[in-house]
Image: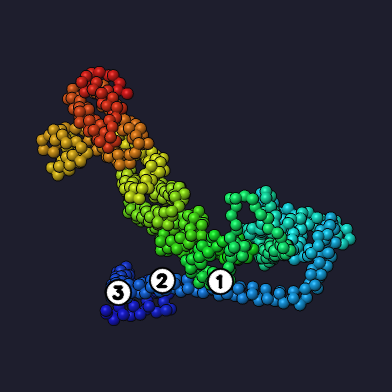
Amino acid sequence: MTETGNRLRKLLESPNFEPQNYVKQLSQQSDGDRDLQEHRQKIQNLADETAQNLKKNVYKNYRQFIETAKEISYLESEMYQLSHILTEQKSIMESITQALLSTDKDETSKEMQAAFPKETEELKQRTLTSLLEKVEGAKTIMDTPGRHLVYNGDLLEYDVDNMSPIQKVHAFLMNDCLLIATWLPNRRGTVKYKYNALYDLESFAVVNVKDNPPMKDMFKILMFPDSRIFQAENSKVKKEWLEILDETKKSKVTKELHKKEEEVPTSPVRAEVSTNPFDEDEPVDAQEGVDLSLEWIQELPEDLDVCIAQRDFEGAVDLLDKLNGYLKDQPVTQKVKELRLTVEERVRQLTEVLVFELSPDRSLRGGPKATRRAVSQLIRLGQSTKACELFLKNRAAAVQTAIRQLRIEGATLLYIHKLCNIFFTSLLETAKEFEMDFSGNTGCYSAFVVWSKSAMRMFVDAFSKQVFDSKESLSTAADCVKVAKEHCQQLTEIGLDLTFTLQSLLVKDIKAALQSYNDIIIEATKHRNSEEMWRKMNLMTPEALAKLKDEMCSCGIGSFEQYTGDDCWVNLSYTIVAFTKQMMSFLEEGLKLYFPELHMVLLESLREIILVAVQHVDYSLRCEQDPEKKAFILQNASFLHDTVLPVVERRFEEGVGKPAKQLQDLRKSTRSVRINPESTTSMV
């Protein structure tokens, strides 16, 4: 580079460079247009040199770019694995912490009850009595012996139907019931509340209501056939209510079971002698009960907690199967009931973890096989219906995400190829995985068929938006529909035929496309007819004539050679030739789109297009006075009747599988033009 070029480069690269000042100084120093042109050329040369250097650097570092991209991809994969491991560790630590806290809490409460049993019970009763004095109409509640207060607080009740606030209430949770009292607008002395309802703990169920702002911190109480919704002050209070309600209900059940055990009579009872000869003596094992002192049974709850924390779902279900097999033929004693209650809580926790594994919020990588582990364990737990529902929801979210992430290319056909490949491959893999996972649950197959149809609707929405809403040509639309049909046929390998569903979802858009293209052809034909001079075509060059012959041959008109003359002349008008090519193209594209529901639409479109040309020929014959032109018009009419229309009928019958009577009748009506040119009989 010259010294001037180096100075110019340093000037442009300087951090204090200001373009406006530079241009102003340059215009003041230049003598005329020639200096400015030379300076412009210098800057252009500098720009070209910079671009060339940039290209060289890109080519030089191209391999480094590729290696860097691979490293980034590997790093992303490792980060995902690390995040997954950290999530698992966090869940394990939380479960261990909760177990330790619950153990400490139970031990502390037992120590307090052992140290101050009477004082604690009496204090709770006195507290409840003092609180109930503030409730109007609640004097008889303390008549039940042993009843004491567990928890109380203010709540806001909402209407179940329209979720509008109704009233402010105060809830009193006792060891055997729940009291709901409403606030009095006009207080009288110490009375603040009014009795509203009293529910036994066994008569209702508590359900957590998912937060949906502004509706949050709510829970529902279900009393068949009614229900009530309450809102806590904040999420912490809501959590306390749910936990304490659950603990109180369990405590009551446990106390009643112990009470029934204590009520068993200890005095000897003389056994009654049965006179029925078919009665059998009860086995000795049944009288003695089930042996639950085995080490693996004693450690079963803790082993289940460890398996759940370590995500060893198979091990947890194996332990449950082992327990069920052991207790299958054993009598149901009180200890067995208590053991089952303990195990059922772990089953509920395991089910929640498996449901979370299948939720669409989790990573959708890995395809359908990634769900097999959770699905198989849910089926083993006897929850095949829930497993089926969650599996199909997971796959629907995966398919929807894949379609949404598909880049919209400039070429519509290329995009449709990618879309069909992604959707139908996912559908085929999902079907195979479903058949493998639910082979023993035939009742779930109907759910898969319903899901397949809904997935097909999602596919057709994306397909139609790209093909039909963007006003693509009929040729492109036909090629796209053909690709979709071919991919849909692949599903028949597994016995799933969704062709009819695909056709029924596309029929509306295809009808509109055929009608739109039909209108375009009719308008173009009418425009050419208005400029018709009834002259022979002169293609000027042999190459153009050979090209026209090839086009006509590809349209199925093999006898076009007889209509060519000397040199490059064609004994047909430009209007008739253009009409023939356009109509045959429409027929071919229509046959690609064809299915039975479109039979009459395609047939009527062809008939309308042919009528436009035939009416024009008929009108020209009636109006033309020149014998030579009339003979030329008759030659074009003969070409339409004897050559074009039979090809249309034959091709339509080949594509559809049955002849078209409407087209045959239309060809018969055109004979009056060909045979008797003086006739003015209308052909419509």
The disc, 3 or 2, on the residue closer to the chain's N-terminal end is: 3
Judging depth in this view, the residue of 5 and 71 nearest the camera is: 71
- Image quarter where the C terminus lies is top left
Residue 377 vs 123, above or below: the answer is above
Residue mark closest to the camera, 1 vs 3:
1
Q: Residue at x 19, y 32 (%)?
A: 572
Q: Secondary structure at mark 3?
A: helix
Residue wearing tag 1: 294
Q: Secondary structure at mark 2?
A: helix
Query: Residue 605: x and y, percent?
Result: 34, 33
Q: CA distance from mark 1 to mark 3?
A: 65 Å
Give the quadrant of residue 263.
bottom right
Query: Residue 351: x and y, percent?
Result: 54, 62
- Image quarter where the N terminus lies is bottom left
Residue mark closest to the camera, 2 vs 1:
1
Q: Residue at x 77, y 54 (%)?
A: 197
Amino acid type, residue under disc 1 in the picture: Leu
* Total labels drawn: 3
Q: CA distance from mark 3 to mark 2?
A: 21 Å
Residue mark closest to the camera, 3 vs 2:
2
Q: Secondary structure at mark 1?
A: loop
Other residues around mark 3 within 10 Å, as few (<14) / some (14–19) / many (≥20): few
Amino acid type, residue under disc 2 in the picture: Ser
Residue 399 in sight here = no
Judging depth in this view, the residue of 313 and 544 nearest the camera is: 313
Residue wearing tag 2: 77
Query: Residue 209: x and y, percent?
Result: 63, 58
Residue 63, labelled with which disc? 3
